[in-house]
Image (cartoon, rainbow, N blue to C red):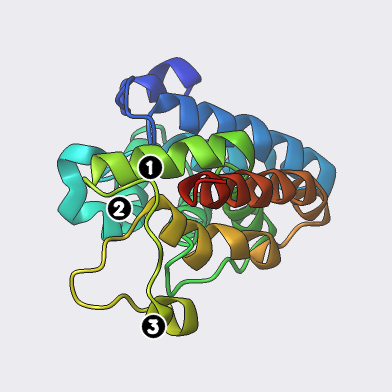
Amino acid sequence: MPTIQEAQQWYPTLDPVHGFDHVLRVYKMAERLAQTENADLEIVRAAALLHDAEGSTPQNEHNRATHHEASASFARTVLEAEGWPEARIAAVEHCIRAHRYRTTETPQTLEAQVLFDADKLDVLGAFGAARTIAYAAQAHQPIYTQPSAQFLTTGKKEPGEPHSSYHEYLFKLSRVKDRLFTAEAKQIAETRHNFLVSFYEQIVSEANGE
């Protein structure tokens, strides 16, 4: 089983979006959900520590869309070196491949659902707001711009339209709580979702001079 100290070397310290602090929050939340839902704690812990280990840093921007696949492959290398049985390695790989919001592989096991929920809870609440703004800054996008009518209707931007943190809130964050699997995560999400709604309502209000 990888340790927290070992995992720390796989992540940047100062990346405000996918840095080691994010991994620790996901790890702690995944432990909580796993214990509540009676999931396999060893698989969940390993998957949480390894879920963003490859391709998620700002320096790998062009690889972020496939970082779940790269991280799953990296996890296999780490766990094979530790002598894990094939079936348990495959279980961890599935958790990692299925943890992204924008992915075609949905979580099929309880452990994968726990990791998905733990990771998604970190885009809600105060840290969710902070990470979304940090991501926009990393991508050289604004905190807020008024979305086009086309984006509000279809989720597709007009040519040249920026993807502000408010766009990301509308497109993803506002919908996250309805994508969660476990009862515990859904309960936690209610408070965090409400905070996020209020936060972006205030952003819009201040942007309009109110």
For badge 1, the amino acid type reads Asp
Circle 3 sits in a helix, a strand or a loop, which is it? helix
Q: Residue 114 in the image: state x and y as whole percent.
A: 66, 51
Q: Are marks 2 and 1 in contact (CB under 8 Å)?
A: yes
User: Quick one: label 2, few (<14), some, or many (20+) residues within 10 Å?
Assistant: many
In the picture of the structure, the residue carrying the numbered disc 1 is 52
Rate crowding at label 3 as few (under 14), some (14 to 19) or many (20 or more) other CA atoms within 10 Å: few
- Cα separation, mark 1 vs mark 3, equals 33 Å
Q: Is residue 168 visible?
A: yes
**Horizontal placement of 61 versus 10: left or right?**
left
Image coordinates of residue 16 in percent, x first then y, are 38, 30
Q: Nearer the viewer, residue 40 or 159?
A: 159
For this rendering, which residue is in front, 92 or 155?
155
**Residue name at image x 42 percent, y 69 percent:** 103
The residue under the point 65% across, 40% down is: 30
In the rendered image, residue 6, in percent from the top left (x then y), is placed at 39, 20
Q: Label 2 is placed on what type of residue?
A: His
Distance between the alpha carbons at the discs numbered 3 and 2: 30 Å
Residue 134 shown left or right of residue 110 in the figure = left
**Circle 1 SS class:** loop
Q: Tally the numbered discs.
A: 3
Which labelled disc corresponds to residue 150? 3
- According to the image, label 2 marks what residue? 67
Give the mark, 3 or 2, whose residue is nearer the N terminus.
2
- Vertical arrangement, residue 152 with respect to residue 66, above or below: below
